[in-house]
């Protein structure tokens, strides 16, 4: 693995670590880390600051997941370890969002950033997972459950669509990390204390 590849992986992490939700909340008088769910992701931003800023946060978090892996896939084609580098860039981006150096390694849960990575891997699989997400949220009222099930289903779609093995390994890693970061949501879902978006309160993503 050459220097360019290593720099690309580092760049992926540093870009993924940018807390767009927190940056967008500056000037509003609201510290999203201390209110709502305390999460820096789009759901908490939308809950505290409105749908527009929530959607913008979502788009930026998706974009920061997509850009590094797309750049690696496009411009590092001569690297003998091309697939490994692309996979590591994708993983580094998600880890950057989850454990941002700028915030003392306390970040978000990685769903939107993972979505950006998945868009590069296989857009059709993303569509299928989004259908799982929407169905789960509509039926249950829990954004966290929709996120968990959508993430869990993604490797299955990749497998059924016949994508290369390295994409399955990357997707598996991202899904495991998303589930780990949702451990508190999982606990609340199991004991019945997770609150539904239908009640306009509660912790979600």
Image: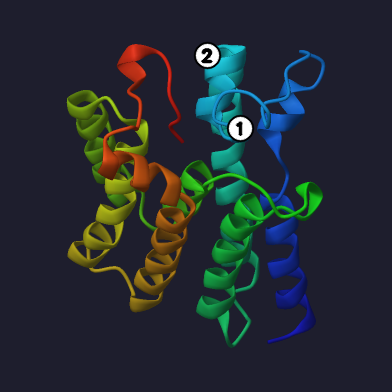
Q: What residue sits 57% from the left and 14% below the top?
A: 52
Mark 1 = which residue? 38
Mark 2 surroundings: few (<14), some (14-19) or many (≥20) residues within 10 A: some
| Viewer-side residue, 158 vs 97 | 97
| Viewer-side residue, 109 vs 118 | 109
Mark 1 surroundings: few (<14), some (14-19) or many (≥20) residues within 10 A: some
Element type at mark 2? helix
Q: Position of residue 140 (x, y in %)?
A: 21, 28
Q: Nearer the viewer, mark 1 or mark 2?
A: 1
Q: What residue sits 34% from the left and 70% below the top?
A: 168
Determine whether, in the image, residue 205 is placed left or right of residue 75: left
Q: Position of residue 37 (x, y in %)?
A: 54, 30
Determine whether, in the image, residue 203 is placed left or right of residue 197: right
| Viewer-side residue, 3 vs 30 | 30
Q: Position of residue 126 (x, y in %)?
A: 33, 46
Q: Quadrant of residue 19?
A: top right
Can the viewer see residue 124?
Answer: no
| Viewer-side residue, 97 vs 86 | 97
In which quadrant is the N terminus drawn?
bottom right
Q: What residue sits 50% from the left and 77% below the top?
A: 83
Mark 2 = which residue? 51
Determine whether, in the image, residue 148 is placed left or right of residue 18: left
Q: Position of residue 10 (x, y in %)?
A: 74, 66
Element type at mark 1? loop
Q: Quadrant of residue 44?
A: top right
């Amino acid at each position: 693995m050459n220097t360019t590849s290593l720099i690309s992986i580092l760049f992926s992490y540093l870009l993924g670590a940018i807390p767009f939700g927190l940056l967008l909340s500056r000037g509003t008088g609201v510290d999203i880390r201390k209110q709502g769910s305390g999460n820096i992701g789009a759901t908490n931003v939308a809950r505290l600051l409105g749908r527009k800023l929530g959607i913008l946060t979502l788009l930026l978090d998706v974009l920061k997941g997509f850009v590094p892996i797309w750049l690696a896939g496009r411009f590092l084609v001569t690297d003998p370890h091309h697939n490994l580098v692309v996979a590591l860039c994708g993983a580094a981006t998600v880890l950057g969002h989850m454990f941002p150096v700028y915030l003392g390694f306390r970040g978000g849960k990685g769903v939107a950033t993972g979505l950006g990575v998945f868009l590069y891997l296989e857009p059709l699989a993303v569509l299928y997972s989004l259908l799982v997400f929407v169905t789960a949220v509509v039926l249950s009222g829990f954004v966290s459950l929709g996120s968990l099930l959508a993430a869990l289903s993604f490797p299955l779609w990749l497998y059924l669509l016949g994508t290369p093995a390295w994409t399955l390994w990357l997707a598996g890693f991202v899904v495991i990390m998303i589930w780990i970061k949702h451990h508190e949501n999982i606990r609340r879902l199991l004991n019945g204390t997770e609150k539904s978006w239908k009640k306009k309160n509660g912790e979600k993503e």
